[in-house]
Image (spheres, rainbow, N blue to C red):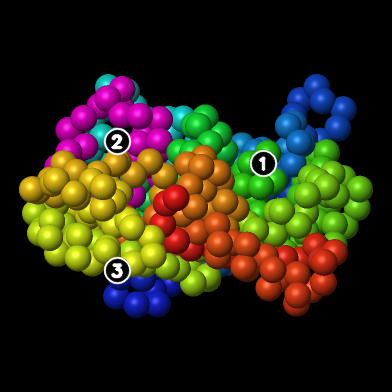
Amino acid sequence: MTELDTARTGADTVSGVEIVLENVVKNYPGQSRPAVDNVSMRIPAGEIVVFVGPSGCGKTTTMRMINRLIEPTSGKITIGGNNALSIDPDRLRRGIGYSIQQAGLFPHLTIAKNVATVPGLIGWDKKKIAQRTDDMLDLVGLDPDVYRDRYPRQLSGGQQQRVGVARALAADPPVLLMDEPFGAVDPITRGLLQDELMRLQSDLGKTIVFVTHDFNEAVKLGDRIAVLGDQSHIMQYDTPDAILASPANDMVAGFVGANASLKQLTLTRVRDVPLLDCPTAYADGSVDELRAAITPRKIKWGLILDARDRPIRWVSLGHLAHATSLQDVGDPIEEVVSTQSTLQDALEALLAESSASTVVTGRRGEYEGLISIDTLVNHLSAMREEHGPNSENGETSVAGPPS
């Protein structure tokens, strides 16, 4: 047991631990002002707290003082009630997950060996490490049999970032520090990675400190947001909806921007709105049965699923008219959102596909339903009726198949 061992709430359920910063200061030699000046805050156990602020404000420095990659000049930091400054730095860091932009993987090591780095350092036996490595790859949506023996250069940027998260979680730390981890990937992959992080958090309940300069990302991910100004002065520290509804000052209002009502879409998850359904079949299923299921419906589309219930292709009655097998029929699915996605993600997916609906998947990529532009419009209408036409506190909804 280490100083940072977590509280157990169930056989396989790990919760994070509270982090408290008290009057933390960082001075650099030759600088007339502190880089971080007298920061005090409490980060609740099991929550995602996002540090957001302009470049150079000190948000990354503040985060790195938690695991002492940067040593505080003065002040106190406790993790799970233990004084982080009294713990050996190497031992401290092995008990805290750390994920950075572009993953920071070791290029000469296989994916499995990258993930196993910290468990190996803390003395786990080989069998336990191998099992944990496979579990972590599966947890972040990478098939261990496919990716275990590959090297980072053989993976896409999004896949590398998933491996980085798996490595950060491999030793089961109560705390995970994430320094702009998704900043170097394209917007679509970034949204998927954000969804994956929220899914993992719902399963694991870690305490996560996440640094970003993107306020939309902060609103989407954060249980709480700390808007930081120069020298990491805390301009506002509150829930996303409270900050959107009532920015503390002009600087925070600048981050919120003029489209606060649109950002409210980020506060509602796809799982919170009704989904539509459509006929489904497996690739080895019957063409006639799928055709019969689609024919009486108003919208003449269905979905082909793989053996793990993951949607792979759209099919229409036109596709099925002369088909003798479902193996290769239909159009590939280009855009999906997960139940963890926000309504803003859903809207962006609908716009990207120029479609009336998009597919919703669950925790392991399995089919859950459809979200449509009609549902989105209906939800907006309901929000306006509830709050009035000028409300800044709206939510949104979505469901349905392609046009």
Q: Assess whether mark 3 and mark 2 are in contact (beta carbons under 8 angstroms).
A: no
Q: Tell me how far mark 1 sits from mark 2, CA to CA.
A: 28 Å
Q: Identify the secondary structure beneath mark 2.
A: helix
Q: Is residue 380 left or right of residue 91?
A: right
Question: What residue is pinned by disc 1?
Answer: 214
Q: Assess whether mark 3 and mark 1 are in contact (beta carbons under 8 angstroms).
A: no
Foreground residue among 96 and 384: 384
Q: Is residue 375 left or right of residue 140?
A: right
Q: Identify the secondary structure beneath mark 1.
A: loop
Task: Name the chief secondary structure element in magenta.
Answer: helix
Task: Identify the residue shown where x is 70% and y is 54%.
Answer: 263
x then y, percent, for residue 39: 77, 51
Task: Identify the residue shown where x is 34% and y is 67%.
Answer: 297
Q: Tell me how far mark 2 sits from mark 3, CA to CA.
A: 52 Å
Which of disc 3 and disc 2 is earlier in sequence?
2
Task: Identify the residue shown where x is 33% and y is 58%.
Answer: 300
Determine which quarter of the picture holds residue 161.
Answer: top left
Question: What residue is pinned by disc 2?
Answer: 114
Q: Identify the secondary structure beneath mark 3.
A: loop
Which amino acid type is marked by label 3?
Pro
Q: Which residues are magenta?
A: 138-165
Question: What residue is pinned by disc 3?
Answer: 296
Which amino acid type is marked by label 1?
Asp
The stretch drawn in magenta includes residue 155:
yes
Classify 362 as above or below 166. Answer: below
